[in-house]
Every structure is written in C-alpha cells, then in structure tokens.
Amino acid sequence: MRPGRGSRPRTRQRPAHEDAVTGLVVAVDRGRYRCLVRQSRRRQVAVTAMRARELGRKGVVVGDTVALVGDVSGQPDALARVVRVEPRTSILRRTADDTDDVERVIVANAGRLVVVTALADPEPRVGMIDRCLVAARDAGMDALLCLTKADLADPAGLLEIYEPLGVPYTVTRRGEDPAELRGLLQDRMSVLVGHSGVGKSTLVNALVPRADRAVGHVNAVTGRGRHTSSSAIALELPEGGWIIDTPGVRGFGLAHIPQEELILGFPELAEGAAGCPPLCSHLEEGCALDAWVAAGHASPLRLESFRRLLTSRDETADQ
C-alpha cells in the first residue's frame, strides 16, 4: 500500500553513517565497485559495492577512498553501499579529444603519472607525451617518463627533448626486470598511461606477481596496438605502494584545461612567452616564442606540439 498524506514528510537530512568503514576502490565494472577494506594490519578483504542513492551524480573512480555500509564481509554474494567519497588529493582527467566538452575522470588520489612510451613498435609520439605532461601539471601530479623496448631503439634522441625539463625517466628492455622502475614507484600511488601496445601490461606483470594482465601486440600494418585492458585497475606492489593500470588510449584530449593555461604545461616556453605582445595567440608572426626557440632555450619539437594544441582549440571555436 502507498503511504497516505499523513506519512512522515521527506527530509533533507541524510544519515551520518558513523558506522561506515573505509575502503579503497581498486576496480569499477558496470556499476559495481571492488573495494579493499583493511581488517587488520596484515589482512584486507575485497568488498563488492554499489553506489548509494544519496551520492547523487557524484562519480566513483579507481583510487577513490570511500565510506562503505552494509555487508562488508567480502563474501561472494555480499553487497555493500558506497555512501561517501572522501576528498580527493588529485584528479587525473582527460577528454576524448580537444573538441569534446565531456570531461572524464580517469583516476583519483594518484601522486605520480607514469607516461609509458615505446621507443619502437609502435614508434614514440612526442605529442602524446607532451599532452600527458600537461595533464599531470593540471592534476597536481608528478610525472615520470618510462621508455620501453630500449632493446629495439636508442632512447638518446627522445631523452634529449625531455632531459632539459627535469622530467625524471627510466628505461626498460624486454625480458629484463624493471628494477629501477620498481624503486621509483615504491610507497606511492602511481598511474600508468600510454598508447596501446607500448608495454604497460608487460610492466605490470613484471612488477606485480600473479597480476595476469593480458599482453597485446602491435599491428604490423597500422603500427597501432590492440587494447588489452578494458578498464582501470589498482594493484598493490609487493614492496609497498600502488600502481593503476589504465586502458591504452588513442589520444589524450585536453579540452578541460583553459586555453590560456596550456602553456603552463610547457615551462620552458612559458618563460619565453613573457616577451610576446599583448593578446598574442602564439600562432601568428611576431610571437616571441620563435626567437626564444631559435636562441636554443627550448626544443622546436616542443613549440610545434604546443602550437598543435592551440590550433586544435581554434578549429573547435570556428565550428
């Protein structure tokens, strides 16, 4: 029976859920959230949860720290509810491309963005690296450049572009243990981002025993890799810390970053832009960045990448 008019009216007050337990979201699958709940110093259980209605439209992503109520036993048929998402320390975002106004949160609370780039098979794409570095700055995250497949190509050319920026890097080879990378990731939460086929899943399998991430191959005709990871997943490192493996991406849109802030992701260009005339678009004749690069203060490839970002924004505005 439906309640009559005399029923207790609705209230804006929400339960405090003082008995809620804390969990870490490690995977998201079709509206279900896999959360790790620590029961003791050495024991934690995996709890499946759904979003509570009171969350409204607030999203829940891998890396979130959440409050859980309900059945948090971790039994196969148990289902808890996510009633609160704790404040995030960082948010890594992207759009599908520079024309997309829909912002997508990839992960939360990661302290480091690891840009995974193969030196060959597929060929490295400087534009993708630059976009990830801009996104890391926007998210307030440290960046780490991880160059894979060094047995196929010399990393010197690519490192020449980024060493002046002070971006830390590590180089790995197929079949070798990524010991240096393991040390850099220890005791932190890091997220791995890169094109399909660059070797993210191979790295994860080497860093986390029994991770069993599927490994893909690069198409010999297109030079592109096949998606082997369909969703982000957080894995605990044996030495301490977490890595979040993300699906390979074709591109990394930055439509969510205001155009005037894009140059902040190119710090070696930002200093030279101080000499530009007022309202300089950085695309027209007379831009001080041309002389700045000609004087050797920044790489021409970085200026080309920055201007490609600006051009994609101008094309969107003209549509």
Image (cartoon, helix red, strand yellow):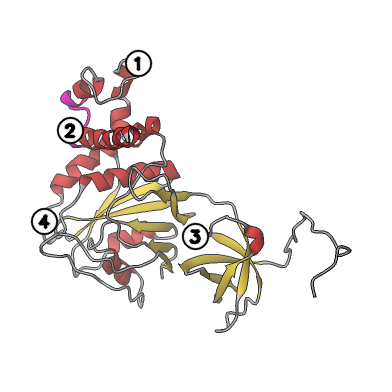
Residue 174: x %, y % from top left = 18, 67
Q: Is residue 168 above or below residue 23?
A: above
Mark 2 or mark 4: name the one nearer the start of the chain. 4
- Write the residue at 20% across / 23% down: 290
In this view of the protein, which residue sits in the foreground, 132 or 190? 132
Q: Which mark is residue 125?
A: none
Tell me the magenta residue range.
293-301
**What element does badge 4 sit on?**
loop
- Write the residue at 49% across / 60% down: 61
Disc 4 residue type? Answer: Ala
Mark 3 or mark 4: name the one nearer the start of the chain. 3
**What element does badge 1 sit on?**
loop
Mark 3 or mark 1: name the one nearer the start of the chain. 3
Q: Which numbered disc, 2 or 4, marks the residue closer to the eye?
A: 2
Q: Which numbered disc, 3 or 2, marks the residue closer to the eye?
A: 3
Residue 167: x %, y % from top left = 30, 44
Mark 1 or mark 4: name the one nearer the start of the chain. 4
Q: Which residue is mark 4?
A: 153
Residue 225: x %, y % from top left = 21, 63
- The span from disc 3 to disc 2 (Cα, nearest Å) is 37 Å
Crowdedness near tag 4: few (<14), some (14–19) or many (≥20) residues, C-alpha within 10 Å: some
Q: Which mark is residue 278?
A: 1
Does the segment drawn in magenta span residue 9? no
Q: Does the residue at mark 3 contact the one at mark 1 (Cβ under 8 Å)? A: no
**What element does badge 3 sit on?**
loop
Residue 77: x %, y % from top left = 57, 84
Q: Which residue is mark 3?
A: 61
Q: Which residue is mark 2?
A: 300
Disc 3 residue type? Answer: Val
